[in-house]
Image: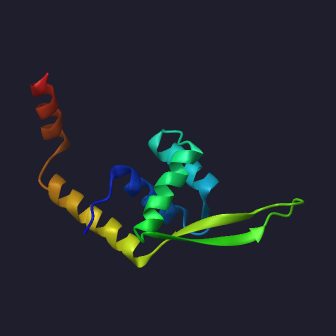
Amino acid sequence: MKYLTKQEEWFLLGIVRLQEPAYLVNIQQHLLENTGRDWAFGSLYVTLDKLKKKGYVETYCGEPAKTRGGKAKKYYRLTEEGLAALAESRRLLDVMWGGLSSALVKKHVSDEK
């Protein structure tokens, strides 16, 4: 199993939380609201393309926009492999965080200073 990067995990979680239809603009808005980071469209495309190549997301096109010459939106949804990758990422995080309290983590950080 390939491990997800934090960014990949956030993108997959964003798509899951948005449900369908998840498209570039609402994925960007969701990530901004939940991570505080304003993701450039270029970085969104790159990451979503990587997730598609890994088989974690698939795309489909919607209807063309009603404006003259309007383009169809590209929508994203998770595949079974994407859901499995998220579940494994969650399982690993639960194992790694298991038994640690936030007070212990804070103490460790303050001891390093």
Q: Is residue 73 left or right of residue 97?
A: right
Position in image of residue 93 (x %, y %): 23, 57
Q: Tally the numbered discs.
A: 0
Position in image of residue 57 (x %, y %): 48, 69
Is 30 or 2 nearer to us in this picture? 2
Q: Is residue 108 left or right of residue 18?
A: left
Q: Is residue 80 left or right of residue 39?
A: left
Q: Residue at x 33, y 73 (%)?
A: 84
Colouring scheme, one of rainbow, by chain, secondary structure, one colour: rainbow
Q: Is 79 above or below relative to 93?
A: below
Q: Pick out the residue farthest to the bottom.
A: 80
Q: Residue at x 9, y 26 (%)?
A: 111
Q: Give the quadrant of the N terminus.
A: bottom left
Q: Residue at x 40, y 67 (%)?
A: 54
Q: Pick out the residue farthest to the top.
A: 113
Q: Quadrant of residue 2?
A: bottom left
Is 89 or 54 nearer to us in this picture? 54
Q: Give the quadrant of the C terminus.
A: top left
Q: Quadrant of residue 91?
A: bottom left
Q: Pick out the residue farthest to the right.
A: 68
Q: Is residue 21 left or right of residue 11?
A: right
Position in image of residue 67 (x %, y %): 87, 59
Position in image of residue 37 (x %, y %): 49, 39
Q: Residue at x 50, y 62 (%)?
A: 15
Is 39 or 105 nearer to us in this picture? 39
